[in-house]
Amino acid sequence: MLILVLSSYALFNRVPSAQAASWNLVWGDDFNGSANTPPSSSNWLYDLGTSYPGGAGNWGTGEVETMTNSTNNVYLDGNGHLAIKPIRDSNGNWTSGRIETQNSSFAAPVGGKMAVEASLQMPNVTGAAAQGYWPAFWMLGSSFRGNYTNWPMAGEIDGMENVNGTNVEYGTLHCGVAPGGPCNEYNGLGGNTPCTGTTCQAGFHTYRVEVDRSTSPEEIRWYLDGVEFWHVASNNPGMDPTTWANAVDHSFFIILNIAMGGSWPGNPSGATASGVPMLVDYVHVYTTSGSGGGPTPTPTPNTPTPTPTSTPTSGCTSGTNFVQGAARSGSTTVPWFQPCGWTAGYVILHYVVPGQVQQNVYMTYNNSTAHWEYNVSGLGSGQTLQYSFTYQQNGLQYDTSTYSYTAP
């Protein structure tokens, strides 16, 4: 989704059905809730505006909409579906919705598999009225979160993309460098297939991507309604082990959105229909057991038990990777993070104040306390702040657990 997909490739004459396996459901959202309410803030965060902080403008693709957290654009329909609806205002400006999972640890275990699956109906609009519509269900490597400059190296797996209301699903891997590289950027390595029975726009279909690390070579496979239509392997022509590992052998987060316009579909026209939603019945993540060291290839840091008060700078003990906490200064709350015996390349704070949407901000290093800190306002007495960190250590990015602090 970050960069357009233009090409399709042959399937090397194989179209098997999805393989049976001992799949374990490890995460899911079935979007059950009251009509016109937002999706679960425990599961999803909003991408807002026209870019990530410090990232490429217009989400890197030239699309024209502004993403919001309004229930006009992103809402539960009361019938077990998430709706993402692009809307054009009276001045011709578009708003839409883009949400991504709070969880960025979805990964195929070493020697195992991961499957990410969604049942959804693309916006039910075709022809001239669909010009500029670009719905997508996709994943980005977790190292992209908070960095926003390491695409396509961090890896992007597009489970479903569609443009301009055509009856076609596109599935793509982005990797390496751009332009060019092993993934032929900016196109990516992609295949496509039509929906059958009902069109992609007229009914719900199941879109699934499997990352298989149990085989040699490793593979990514794309399925529409249980039938494989595309795959990419770690021994693809021109693919090298480092590029593959950087793009695939790690954790991901999931994104759902509708872009409007951009370099692939072209911009909306005066004939483009406003207010036609993508409906999502569910998003599920499955894994199988692995053989080489646990479900998440990205190491998990050693996290201490969170505390609602500040911890002295001498809180580091043997075997502790970092200490953290939060302190109160007047009406301001100051979450802090302290590496133990190492230097962080950066630290990003993810936090939620009750009644507000999640914020994702870079922290500032305080030499006097040896802490990375950020001042959070708006937390009232007796309210609880939920927060977590993303940090860089030795060139790798890690996510922590979620902590809480209740203001006195």
Image (spheres, rainbow, N blue to C red):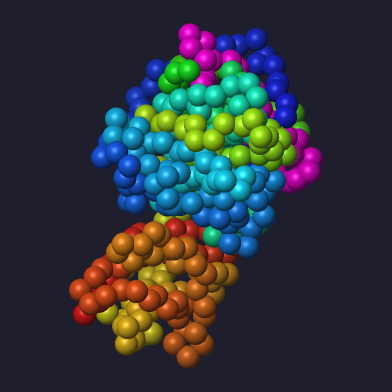
* Residue 129 location (% of width, % of height): 61, 27
Outermost residue, bottom direction? 368
**Residue at 54% of width from left, 24% of height from top?**
125
**Residue at 42% of width from left, 69% of height from top?**
321
- Our reading of the magenta stretch's main secondary structure is loop
In magenta, the rendered stretch is 172-201
**Residue at 38% of width from left, 85% of height from top?**
313
Q: Is residue 206 left or right of residue 51?
A: left
- Is residue 175 in the magenta section? yes
Task: Give the quarter of the figure containing the C terminus.
Answer: bottom left
Task: Give the quarter of the figure containing the N terminus.
Answer: top right
* Residue 254 location (% of width, % of height): 47, 42
Relative to 7, is 335 above or below?
below
Viewer-proximal residue, 122 or 152?
A: 122
* Residue 68 location (% of width, % of height): 49, 51
* Residue 186 location (% of width, % of height): 74, 39
Picture mark count? 0
**Residue at 40% of width from left, 60% of height from top?**
358
